[in-house]
Image (cartoon, rainbow, N blue to C red):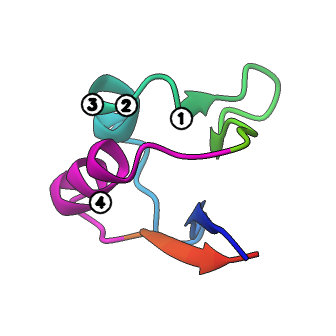
């Protein structure tokens, strides 16, 4: 099991603060315009936690996979 960040797209307001804080984990899909998670073997917990804390809609969370 590993922790993976997930975004609730129904709550995301596209502020892109997660991309600014953690561009190695979050990106904007050029085709859909949605913010998405980059597939990585491991995620930098401190950086993701900072992005979570700065998210105005509180739409980023951890999921065990």
Magenta segment includes 15? no
Q: CA distance from mark 4 to mark 3?
A: 10 Å
Q: In x, y percent, where is residue 54?
A: 17, 53
Q: Is residue 38 left or right of residue 8?
A: right
Q: Which residue is mark 4?
A: 52
Do the residues under discs 3 and 2 have CB atoms within 8 angstroms? yes
Q: Earlier in the sequence, mark 4 or mark 2?
A: 2
Do the residues under discs 1 and 2 have CB atoms within 8 angstroms? yes
Q: CA distance from mark 1 to mark 2?
A: 6 Å
Dot 4: what SS? Answer: helix
Residue nearer the viewer, 18 or 3: 3
Q: Is residue 10 above or below residue 25?
A: below
Q: Which residue is mark 2?
A: 22
Q: Residue 48 — which label? A: none
Q: Which residue is mark 3?
A: 21
Q: Residue 25 — which label? A: 1
Q: Residues within 10 Å of mark 3 (few under 14, many from 20)?
A: some
Q: CA distance from mark 1 to mark 4?
A: 12 Å
Q: In x, y percent, where is residue 58?
A: 31, 71
Residue 30: image quadrant is: top right
């Amino acid at each position: 099991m590993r922790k993976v960040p997930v975004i609730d797209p129904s709550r995301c307001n596209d502020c892109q603060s997660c991309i600014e804080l953690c561009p190695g984990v979050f990106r904007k899909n050029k085709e859909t315009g949605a913010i998405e998670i980059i597939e990585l073997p491991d995620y930098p917990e401190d950086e993701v936690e900072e992005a979570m804390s700065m998210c105005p809609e509180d739409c980023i969370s951890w999921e065990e996979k």
